[in-house]
Image: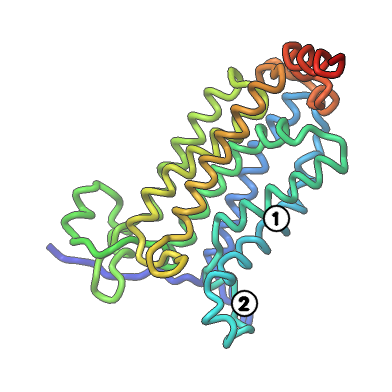
């Protein structure tokens, strides 16, 4: 059987000295589709139509900075001697966990300043974030990065994936696990699950389940990769962060469930900020506090 070995050019368009890379186009596509999905839900929920248009500007800036700084931080041995390479984001080197930290920080600040419920907005955004991640992984595919260990061509053919993916996973004569594809498919399935269960979940649980779901998949997929950021010689950074995220999300979920009378996401219409304050704690908790004060 004839084996094709034609790599995809990472540069989509060249206009003189200006080059537009597929990586940037794919990331932008993910952002646009994610925005469209979130904006539709925002309108459906009776929130301002320009909420996510306004918020997206901050999320994009914080996410890009966070994703790059996270990657640079765990590769200081290289970037310390090559500081100009820090700005070369078109060559890859954007860590999703760093982007998530930056994006959530932007969302937390924005909702607090503008008077929205963070958890309501985060629940709306969760499927969109996962959709953006699913699409963004194809940027790694174009750059032939974020792949797993060596495999045979026969192994890839048995996965029944398109020929162009198999060909592009041939890097310098060796075929590799398409871990970008595993994570992309995992994320797409997650988007569907979140959209189906979100209306029935307590407010704030959708985003927490997203964090748990993504982290579980990332933990196992990261174990296959050959380019993991490391903490020392033994621990993969993404796996450590995934475990911390899972534990943190579960703790917050249990705390909110016990502390507040949370409505179902599907029953909430309009801005829930006023109802998401401590004064709406469960009655049993409030009664206990009053008894303690009397003593």
* Badge 2 element: helix
The residue shown at (69%, 17%) is 263
Q: Is residue 134 above or below residue 40?
A: below
Q: Is residue 177 left or right of residue 203?
A: left
Residue 52 lies, in percent from the top left, at: 75, 41
Q: Is residue 257 above or below residue 105?
A: above
Q: How many numbered circles does the render carry?
A: 2
Closest to the observer, 238 or 44: 238
**Label 2 packing within 10 angstroms: few (<14), some (14-19), many (20+):** some
Residue 197 lies, in percent from the top left, at: 54, 23
Residue identifier under label 1: 60
The figure's colour scheme reads rainbow
Looking at the figure, which quarter contains the N terminus?
bottom left
The residue shown at (55%, 28%) is 195
Q: Is residue 191 left or right of residue 294?
A: left
The residue at the far left in this view is 1
Residue 8 lies, in percent from the top left, at: 40, 68
Q: Is residue 280 above or below residue 231?
A: above
Q: Earlier in the sequence, mark 2 or mark 1?
A: 1
Residue 47 lies, in percent from the top left, at: 80, 29
Residue identifier under label 2: 86
Q: Toward which corner of the image does residue 62 lie, by quadrant?
A: bottom right
Q: Toward which corner of the image does residue 46 lie, by quadrant?
A: top right
Front: mark 2 or 1: 2
* Badge 1 element: helix
């Amino acid at each position: 059987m004839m084996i094709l070995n034609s790599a995809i050019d990472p540069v989509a368009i060249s206009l003189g000295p200006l080059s537009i890379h597929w990586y940037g186009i794919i990331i932008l596509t993910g952002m646009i589709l994610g925005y469209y999905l979130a904006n539709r839900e925002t309108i459906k929920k009776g929130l301002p139509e320009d909420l996510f248009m306004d918020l997206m500007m901050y999320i994009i800036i914080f996410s890009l900075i966070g994703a790059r700084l996270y990657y640079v931080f765990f590769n200081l041995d290289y970037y310390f001697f090559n500081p100009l390479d820090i700005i070369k984001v078109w060559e890859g080197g954007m860590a999703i966990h760093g982007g998530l930290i930056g994006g959530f920080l932007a969302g937390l600040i924005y909702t607090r300043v503008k008077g929205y419920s963070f958890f309501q907005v985060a629940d709306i955004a969760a499927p969109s974030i996962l959709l953006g991640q699913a699409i963004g992984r194809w940027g790694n595919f174009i750059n032939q990065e974020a792949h797993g260990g060596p495999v045979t061509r026969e192994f890839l053919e048995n996965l029944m994936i398109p020929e162009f993916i198999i060909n592009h996973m041939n890097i310098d004569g060796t075929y590799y696990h398409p871990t970008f594809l595993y994570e992309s498919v995992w994320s797409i399935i997650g988007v569907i699950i979140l959209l189906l269960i979100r209306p029935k979940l307590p407010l704030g649980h959708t985003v927490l389940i997203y964090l748990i779901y993504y982290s579980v998949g990332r933990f196992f997929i990261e174990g296959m990769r050959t380019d993991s950021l490391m903490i020392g010689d033994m621990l993969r950074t993404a796996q450590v962060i995934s475990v911390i995220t899972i534990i943190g999300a579960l703790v917050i979920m249990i705390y909110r469930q016990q502390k507040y009378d949370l409505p179902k996401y599907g029953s909430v219409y309009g801005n829930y900020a006023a109802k998401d304050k401590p004064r709406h704690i469960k009655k049993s908790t409030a009664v206990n506090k009053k008894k303690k004060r009397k003593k």
